[in-house]
Image: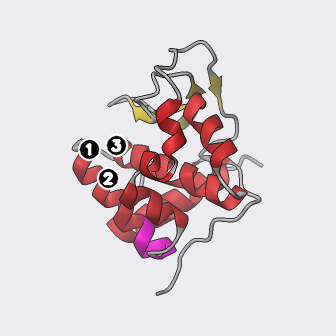
């Protein structure tokens, strides 16, 4: 299988999102530009969301922080971020049905990263099934700590010389 992307340990949110966009475009032939990533506190039953019609992908900071402690490597953490961003990017492309989106995240991950890749396992099994400790996070809080990630979706921005 020809791998389009490779998740490495030296990646930031923009690097990972660039891989998400390339992977989705290769698998589904769809693309969208001009999105913004927001990290915030959410109820811990919500990993992330995309508000329909907006340009925002919103990720649960508490879950991200918990996963960063539970993973065994930075590649595993970046694979989690890849899975979450792929899921929300598909919503931003207009896919609404959660079951269909979950299946598409697995398809995109498997076709571009391989069946045994951590991102593929996370998308097929579910993050809480892999990291059982996430069940103990409690209810969570809403919006007390919000950050807009700078330099996100840079591949969509033309350079001005």
Residue 40 location, x and y as percent?
57, 24
Identify the secondary structure beneath mark 3.
helix
The residue depicted at 50 percent of the width and 61 percent of the height is: 119
Please name whichever residue, 137 or 56, is drawn nearer the observer in this view of the structure.
137
> What is the distance, in whole Å, between disc 2 and disc 3 at their CAs?
10 Å
Callout 2 secondary element: helix
Per the rendered image, the range of residues in magenta is 109-114
Residue in view at x 54 percent, y 15 percent: 143
Asked whether the residues under the numbered discs 2 and 3 touch, taking CB atoms below 8 Å apart as contact, a structural biologist would say no
In the depicted structure, whether residue 14 falls above or below residue 120: above
Q: Residue 102's mark? A: 2
Q: 104 or 139, which is in the foreground?
A: 139
State whether residue 35 appears in this view: no
Q: Earlier in the sequence, mark 1 or mark 3?
A: 3
Query: Does label 2 or label 3 sit earlier along the sequence?
Result: 3
Q: Mark 3 highlights which residue?
A: 91
Tell me, yes or no, whether the highlighted magenta stretch contains residue 89: no
For mark 1, what is the residue?
98
The dominant secondary structure in magenta is: helix
Q: Are marks 2 and 1 in contact (CB under 8 Å)?
A: yes
Task: Tell me if I can see residue 159 in this picture.
Answer: yes
As measured in the structure, the alpha-carbon distance from the residue carrying label 1 to the one carrying label 3 is: 9 Å
Q: Which mark is residue 45?
A: none
């Amino acid at each position: 299988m020809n791998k389009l992307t490779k998740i490495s340990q030296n990646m930031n949110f923009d690097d990972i999102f660039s891989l998400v966009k390339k992977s989705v475009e290769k698998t589904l032939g769809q693309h969208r530009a001009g999105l913004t990533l927001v990290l915030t506190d959410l109820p811990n039953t919500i990993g992330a969301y995309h508000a329909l019609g907006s340009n925002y992908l919103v990720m649960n900071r508490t879950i991200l922080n918990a996963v960063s402690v539970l993973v065994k490597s930075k590649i595993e953490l970046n694979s989690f971020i890849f899975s979450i961003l792929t899921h929300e990017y598909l919503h931003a492309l207009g896919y609404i049905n959660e079951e269909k989106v979950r299946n598409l995240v697995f398809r995109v991950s498997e076709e571009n990263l391989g069946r045994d890749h951590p991102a593929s396992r996370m998308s097929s099994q579910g993050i809480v099934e892999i990291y059982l400790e996430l069940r103990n996070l409690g209810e969570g809080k809403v919006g007390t700590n919000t950050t807009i990630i700078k330099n996100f979706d840079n591949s969509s921005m033309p350079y001005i010389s």
